Image (spheres, coloured by chain):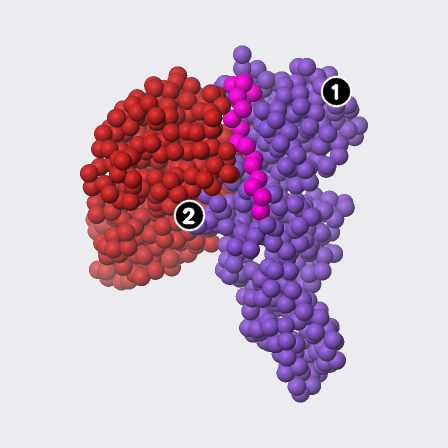
Chain colours: A purple, B red
Amino acid sequence: MTSVGIGILGAGTVGGVVVRRLTEDRESVLVRTGLDLEVKRVAVRDAERGRGIDASLVTTDARAVVDDPTVQLIVELIGGVDPAGELVLAALAAGKPVVTANKELIAARGPELFAAAAAAGVPLLFEAAVGGGIPIIRPLAETLAGEVLSRVSGIVNGTTNFVLTQMSDMGEDYAAALATAQDLGLAEADPTADVSGADAAAKAAILASLAFGTWVPVASIHTEGITDISPIDIEFAAGLGYVVKLLAIAERTEQGVNARVHPALVKDDHPLAAIRGATNAIFIEGPSVDQLLFAGPGAGGEPTATAVLGDVIDAARELLAGSDAAPRILFAPGEVLDFGEVSSKWYLRLEVADLPGVLAQIASSFGEAEVSIKSVWQEGLGDEATLLLITHSAREAQQRQAVESLEGLAVVKRVAAAIRVESDEV
Amino acid sequence: MTSVGIGILGAGTVGGVVVRRLTEDRESVLVRTGLDLEVKRVAVRDAERGRGIDASLVTTDARAVVDDPTVQLIVELIGGVDPAGELVLAALAAGKPVVTANKELIAARGPELFAAAAAAGVPLLFEAAVGGGIPIIRPLAETLAGEVLSRVSGIVNGTTNFVLTQMSDMGEDYAAALATAQDLGLAEADPTADVSGADAAAKAAILASLAFGTWVPVASIHTEGITDISPIDIEFAAGLGYVVKLLAIAERTEQGVNARVHPALVKDDHPLAAIRGATNAIFIEGPSVDQLLFAGPGAGGEPTATAVLGDVIDAARELLAGSDAAPRILFAPGEVLDFGEVSSKWYLRLEVADLPGVLAQIASSFGEAEVSIKSVWQEGLGDEATLLLITHSAREAQQRQAVESLEGLAVVKRVAAAIRVESDEV
């Protein structure tokens, strides 16, 4: 018997495509994989009714889909932590493999869910949770399982990369670039999760945890979004040979692992600088693999559905084999390094009085915090004087001390911008 | 019981690293995966003896390793079709999972080996066979299994990419650049398999077969190497905004699938143009995933060993689960398109007499073959006149007819170079 009954929870952007492709490609999947995947029930919200999905399959009761005895495998595409978490746990407890694209859920409750899957002896797969159509979870969890990785970094949110690309190319300010993204359907009406960095932080938690084998809670991830990025800094950065990107960075150091999300200046000849619009790109570094790059569409119904379908085929295969061979996601205890201990270079834009001795006072503030200045440029004169600085690498705590000290100087009117520089490390 | 006895066949560049890492990282792998992987026997050639491998594990009798009752899983790193093929078949027949990095073997005998693995109900994994440390086989076979792909293309041989990069950067001719590669250990003493394109053709056969679900025999792959590439064409190409790369290209068209390996002009702002030295990069395209890029170290003991170890962990997990859930590599019947029917643009360098009417005669040769000329440049004068042409896209058969016709013209002294142009399609 090669037939597997599939229950889909959620028929939104991704769910709608998954239902359609499972239905349309049923014969082709059977030929290619030997698996007959049949959609038995689809849980929808009222608003999603009638989107071309066979009405006899549709219900608004997601729990009824999980409990349906003809449903052997659950695809969770509702998103959010509740009620998705309880539905996934109920499915696993009933011995039904689960495929999900839900980054918030995995980031919030990963260890509990992986333990439930292990206890039930069924797979919990989530390739689509990070990087949309880019295969990244399986390479991390399986192909690279033979190596302890040192760093994962990249552009994991397409909306913010589009907005930053638009600001850079068109000289638009943040609000105008966001409005363009919304007009094109690349940003939601409420863009908070994207522009605040929260979406990237959930993905960073998952990537860091898989790469290092130590669970990195999303609460430990220092997160800054792009709402404070000014066109003037994008322009100044370009003049200095940098591009501004929102990066997710996960690092393993001798002191512990760390993950963070923040805007960063990236050298304009770095491969990440060339990643434009809604594309995602992820670097993986390790002592043996050196540096791997994965790039592609980070969101969108069709690419994400491809990742979901790959997981469905894998989970169905495991189910039919009656096996429990899905990779165990195991986490060893490990130190999560406090963000204050993480070192980076900073770009600073200061509005200063153009008086003799200003630079000496500023240099002294940096000196007290033990932060070295790498380069300084002055733009403008008199009351309009602007000082651009790039520092050498120093710990966050030192960099912040320097900024506080600068803010206390009478000659410094304002620390107008402070953005980390990641060119050498990324 | 979580212990698995491993037998390694071959202790060369990759095998030596695999043995060392399995031994050194045994505890760390156990913590991270729950699997206790123990190297029981290592088959070596005489020349490989004593390379830091525990002498009590070593034998020169590979078959004895396969037959050893304490060996439960075989890692084949001998390379070549014989005797590797018979050893792999013997291991599978004995119910022992096999991990191999052997592209020649998979390309030459893939369907037979996959059938033997399916019949035995044990995994045959080969992530390291293409792209060294780059995860590419598993993404193709598993993550992207839900989509029928349209095109796979890229740089899959690091030696030739290094030689072409060296020719381009240093203006060296082919022989000098190859000698540099040999000095650096990036090319073998006998470089034939790399520079002839044969290595890339074996990888192209594997990539095409996995991407399209139709077995593409290596014998069907049109293969040209880099031995005829002149520095002058690299220089002319650069002047026209192109970089010369050795590409493997697999395409699915309405007429059938096709794979080929040949040098090609790539636009200098294309991502593949930026892939320098021994790095590999592979593009995957499909109707839903759009375009994915994978890049990283395409060879070398350490990266390749990481790919081997990922497969070993996966195969060991399957073995312990007593399961038969490894993805079945299934091939549907499909048409392999004759290379003569494949369309591309061509770059041509002609040595011509600088006489009135030359261009008219040349244009007429192209016209008869129904090939349109896109651009023409003349370099030099008199007896030294050189004509560079780039054509519009036309079938191979037409392009070759045009070249034959040109060679018959008295005003054409020589068709000095003919290189395909892939900028728009890659």
Q: What's drawn in magenta, residue-wise?
A: A317-334
As rendered, which of B27 and A41 lies closer to the eye?
B27
- Residue A310: quadrant of the picture: top right
Gap in Å between the C-alphas at discs 1 and 2? 48 Å
Can residue B63 be seen here? The reply is yes
Answer with the quarter of the image where residue B403 lies: top left
Label 2 amino acid?
Ser
Amino acid under label 1? Ala
**Which residue is denoted by mark 2 in the rendering?**
A288
The answer to whether the residue labelled 1 contacts the one labelled 2, judged by CB atoms less than 8 Å apart, is no
Confirm whether residue A421 shows in the render.
Answer: no
Give the chain letter at badge 1: A
Residue A327 located within the stretch drawn in magenta: yes
Which residue occupies 66% across, 54% down? A222
Residue at 38%, 29% (x, y): give it. B5
Pick the residue in front: A118 or B300: A118
Given residues B16 and B162, the one toward you in this image is: B16
Q: Is residue B200 left or right of residue A380?
A: left
In the picture, measured across the screen, residue A62 lies left or right of residue A99, that is right
Which numbered dot is residue A64? Answer: 1
Q: Secondary structure at mark 2?
A: loop
Rendering coords of residue A357 (x, y %): 66, 86
- Residue A411: x and y, percent? 72, 80
